[in-house]
Image (cartoon, rainbow, N blue to C red):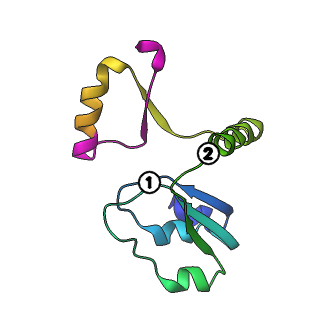
Amino acid sequence: AQFNKARKSFDFILNTISAQHDYNAYLNLLKTNGTMVLVGVPPQPVPVHAFSLIGGRRSLAGSLIGGIKETQEMLDYCAEKNIVSDVEVIAMKDINTAYERMLKGDVRYRFVIDMATL
C-alpha cells in the first residue's frame, strides 16, 4: 500500500539492500528518467522486468565503492537535506546476537554499532 502511494515519486534511489527483494517494486517508485543505484550485493541474480526500465526511461546502475571524498560529500548532502536512514543501533556487547539475527533474516534495517560502547 505504501509503495502504491509513493509510485513515481523519486528521482533517485540508493538501494543498499543486500537481501533478495523485489527490485521492480523499487523501480516503479522512480519518476521518468529516475535512477536506482545498487550498492548492496544480493546473493542471487537481480530479476528486473525490462519494461520497468524502458517504459519509464529509468536507469539501473551499480557501484562497489565510494572514496572518502564521495562519502563525505554524501554525508554533508544528507545532513543539509535532513535525509536519514532507518537503522538499529546496537551496543558492542550485542554483536553476537546481531550476527545470529542477521543469519536468521531477523533484521529489518541495517545494524549500526554504537562505538561509544567499545
In depth, the one of 67 and 46 nearer the eye is 67
In depth, the one of 29 and 94 nearer the eye is 94
Instruction: Please give the range of residues in magenta.
Output: 102-118
Q: Name the residue under label 1.
A: 17
Is residue 65 located in the magenta-colored stretch of the structure? Answer: no
Q: In which quarter of the image is the C terminus?
A: top left
Rendered residue at 55%/70% (across/down)? 27
Q: In this view, does 32 lie to the left or right of 109?
A: right
Rendered residue at 50%/61% (across/down)? 1
Mark 2 closeness class: few <14, some 14–19, many ≥20 residues within 10 Å = few
Q: Mark 2 points at which residue?
A: 67
**Image vertical order of residue 40 relative to residue 107, above or below:** below
Residue 5: percent from the left, percent from the top?
Answer: 60, 62
Residue 9: percent from the left, percent from the top?
Answer: 68, 64
**Residue 37 quadrant:** bottom right
Does dot 1 land on a helix, a strand or a loop?
Answer: loop
Is residue 112 located in the magenta-colored stretch of the structure? Answer: yes
**Image vertical order of residue 90 relative to residue 116, above or below:** below
Residue 96: percent from the left, percent from the top?
Answer: 25, 27
**Residue 7 quadrant:** bottom right
**Image vertical order of residue 77 relative to residue 8, above or below:** above
In depth, the one of 59 and 8 nearer the eye is 59
- Disc 1 residue type (three-letter): Ile
Give the spatial CA distance, label 2 vs label 1: 20 Å
The label on residue 28 is none
Residue 20: percent from the left, percent from the top?
Answer: 35, 61
- Which of pointers 2 and 1 indicates the residue nearer the eye? 2
Mark 1 closeness class: few <14, some 14–19, many ≥20 residues within 10 Å = some
